[in-house]
Image (spheres, grey):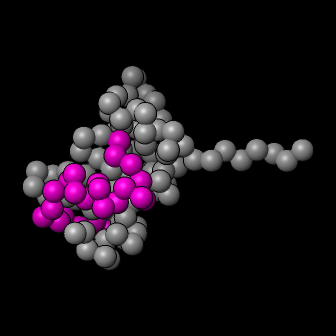
Amino acid sequence: MLPAELRRDIQWMKAEGNYVDVHGKTGHQLVNYVFSRAVEEAQALGVQVHRSYWVARVAVSRIERHQGRTFAVLKDGTRVPVSRGFQSQLAELQPEEKHPRA
């Protein structure tokens, strides 16, 4: 199980072999854990966007496409790659657009 202090402010995760690099608002920690299990535990908070990356919905600022590649750009400026196989997850990441009131 991911440590509670990491789950509280998790922004994104990256698989690193037998470890998961968990990034939060105040830093990151390398945890000896299986990435697929970490993704399952954090499923309510975000989505997997690549076989090695997961992002929290609240952390995403925008989706960016550049030279045929797609990235989830986080509020802190981090660019997380989105693979073709996970493109369908993008609808869950799109920040809500603010529509002017009539």
Q: Residue furthest top?
A: 68
The percent position of residue 7, horizontal first and vertical second, equals 34, 69
Magenta-colored stretch includes residue 75: no
62 to the left or right of 17: right
The percent position of residue 28, horizontal first and vertical second, equals 28, 65
Marks counted in the figure total 0
Q: Residue at x 18, y 64 (%)?
A: 30
Q: Nearer the viewer, residue 46 or 59?
A: 46
The percent position of residue 4, horizontal first and vertical second, equals 31, 76
Q: Which residues are magenta?
A: 27-49
Above or below — where is 38 with respect to 88?
below
Q: Residue furthest right?
A: 102
Above or below — where is 28 with respect to 47?
below
Magenta-colored stretch includes residue 38: yes
Query: In which image quadrant can residue 71 be found?
Result: top left
- Rendered-image quadrant of the N terminus: bottom left
101 to the left or right of 58: right
Above or below — where is 45 with respect to 99?
below
